[in-house]
Image (spheres, rainbow, N blue to C red):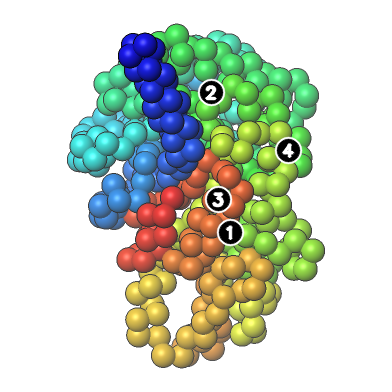
Amino acid sequence: MRKELLICILGIFVGFMIGIIIQVPHKKHVVGFMPYWLLDKADKDYSVYLTTLTYFAVTLEKDGHIMTKTSEQESEPGWYALTSGKADSHLKKAKEDDMELSLAVFMAGEEEIGIMIDTPEKSAQNLLDDIIPLMKEYEFTDLNLDIESVKEASPEARMNFVTFTKTLKEGLDMADVGTLSIDISPTAFIKPYLIDPERVGPLIDTMIVMGYDYHFPGSAVTGAVAPLGGVGSFAEFDVATSIAEAKKIIPQHKLIVGIPSYGYEWETIDNFPRAATMPSSGTVASHRRVEELLTDCKQCQRGVEEGSEEAYVIYKDEDTQMYHQIFYPDEQSTQVKVQFVKSEGLGGLALWALGYEGETILEPLKEL
């Protein structure tokens, strides 16, 4: 009788503990991309903000192999920074702080990408042959795939990319080296770009929606770089709309929203937001630079655009008599994105890029 009672009590206890475990929400992914050209500026203790540090990046050749040289005399800079030890201190600190390490592989250029995926299985195997030893050596536990094709692709090309991704995932699993994440344009959910999210989604572990560059240096008018809202009033597309489209086909826990730590600055004739820009005047404005600008800019007109929930600053250059407009993310816009991720039940946030941030923009990430 006593034995049966103990078994019963034990069963109730185990059931209670399982219930607690099930109800405890999983920690959100908070990914920080660290580009090789910003290693010297990435000077924060990122362990209090991030769960994953992603080194960006090694570049792919047209056959899928990793590019190690840009010429006979010059090493490819991303490869060199990683293999020469320049990134070692950041990687070591991340491991000591129990952060996951991810390695990004990058490719741009429509022609080069097209050549690579013409032979998807061979290209994927070439990448695996190069990347698996690298991941083991530096203890990367995720491979981040950043293939930046932003034009509409043929059905055949889209299927080739699915085959490429499938071969890559199977190879990573067989070698037991880690997960596979992929970066994707927000408009890929409404346009037939090379990456078909519906078919690629089941093959990857996380999908980072690059929720920025809705306005860019060449934009005809000033505006938010990463607008949360605005569709139907002053924008054709925004982050909330892209995520709504993504959730129709991708499990929400796989979706990670990419947010910027930079903005853009343009010259304009007018001093109101969304004014026409001067041609070729657009340039990157890091959050760090904007913070420094605002410390002693007495004439700066500051505001937050309703709908996009992004900050802006406007000031006049007394030498040229031209206005300068900067749309940029700040602590408040990060807070809004954190709340958005929570309310939508998404997998987390990803920051592009470490080294651009000032003193305050990362603070809301502690809440994820």
Residue 359 position (above or below residue 101): below
Alpha carbon distance from label 4 to label 1: 21 Å
Residue kind at label 4, given as amino acid type:
Lys
Alpha carbon distance from label 2 to label 1: 31 Å
Residue labelled with disc 2:
62
Res. 28 mark:
none
Given contact means CB atoms under 8 Å apart, are the residues at marks 4 and 3 in contact? no
Residue labelled with disc 3:
341
As drawn, is 214 to the left or to the right of 171?
A: right
Alpha carbon distance from label 3 to label 2: 36 Å
What secondary structure is marked by label 2?
A: loop
Residue kind at label 1, given as amino acid type:
Ala
Residue labelled with disc 4:
248
Is tag 4's residue or tag 3's residue first in the polypeptide sequence?
Answer: 4
Is tag 3's residue or tag 1's residue first in the polypeptide sequence?
Answer: 1
Q: Is residue 221 visible?
A: yes
Q: Nearer the viewer, mark 4 or mark 1?
A: 4
User: Dot 1 surroundings within 10 Å: few (below 14), some, or many (20 or more)?
Assistant: many
Residue labelled with disc 1:
226
Question: x, y percentage for residue 38?
Answer: 33, 50
The quadrant where residue 1 appears: top left
As drawn, is 330 to the left or to the right of 177?
A: right
Given contact means CB atoms under 8 Å apart, are the residues at marks 3 and 1 in contact? no
Given contact means CB atoms under 8 Å apart, are the residues at marks 4 and 2 in contact? no
Residue located at (59% from left, 68% from top): 309
User: Between 303 and 5, which is closer to the camera in this rendering?
Assistant: 5
What secondary structure is marked by label 4?
A: loop
Residue located at (66% from left, 68% from top): 307
Alpha carbon distance from label 3 to label 1: 14 Å
